[in-house]
Image (cartoon, helix red, strand yellow):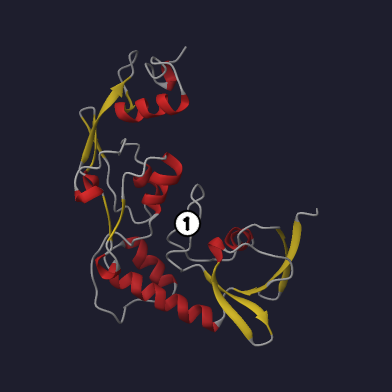
Amino acid sequence: MENLITINIDGKDVKAEKGSNLLPVLSKMGIFIPTLCTHDQIKPYGVCRLCIVEWVRGEGWTKIVTSCNFPVKDGQKFLTNSEKVRRERQMIMELILARSSNVPEVVELAKRLGVTEPRFPKDEEGCILCGLCIKACEEVVGVSAIGFQSRGPNRSVVSPFDDEAHRCIGCGSCVYVCPTNYIKMEEKDHVRKIPLWHVEFKMQKCKTCGQDIAPEKQLRYIRRKADLPENFFDNCLNCRP
């Protein structure tokens, strides 16, 4: 029990694990906190800033913080839906909606936050620059095949020199974590393609049933990292003895 602390959320005292980030605590309480850049398998870093809350530090002294990467301490107080929080969230949402006005996931979240029409010039970028694809490739897969390019309004996620991502192994992690479904993956005739990174991969077939298992390059990478025998992926899971 010594790992548990008490924090105050919207006037209610709740128990939380010492050092845990605030967002999971709020989610466990059933409090809706919008976010477009968090994933269970990736270290949070608060880039979309939609998950902001108001940290009450003293009488008349508050600070806006991102809840996804804010470690809680005993006795802290937070407001999740104050006027200040709502106002700043709507401004952030307006900026995201202006950039990605044609993305259904963005439009729906904006409506939920009371934003239907941004005051800023609209664009139709499918990528919201959350960076989850980059983080997944770097932190989870350990490859770092893609990255950010430029700054400000010209910032984008690209493969090196906007050419073929030579380090990409075709695992599709970037596709799975993308919150807007902007990154597409295609599989046809035993070939997997990720057009955005200008890459395609030959799939390895199960030697027993002939079904595709995964890209050959991905399986070579896994064998090397895990020091597995050369024939480890000869058969799919269903056909292994």
Is residue 90 depicted above or below 197 in this figure? below
Judging depth in this view, the residue of 232 and 36 nearest the camera is 232
Judging depth in this view, the residue of 60 and 152 nearest the camera is 152
Is residue 91 depicted above or below 215 in this figure? below
- What residue would you read off at disc 1? 38
Counting from the top left corner in percent of width and height, residue 93 is at 39, 73
Q: Is residue 125 left or right of residue 69?
A: left
Q: Amino acid at mark 1?
A: Thr
Counting from the top left corner in percent of width and height, residue 156 is at 27, 60
Counting from the top left corner in percent of width and height, residue 45 is at 48, 60
Q: Residues within 10 Å of mark 1 (few under 14, many from 20)?
A: many
Residue at image coords 38%, 66%: 108
Is residue 71 depicted above or below 132 in this figure? below
Q: Quadrant of residue 222?
A: top left
Please state the total of marks drawn on the protein image.
Answer: 1
Residue at image coords 34%, 74%: 95
Residue at image coords 40%, 53%: 132
Q: Residue furthest right?
A: 1
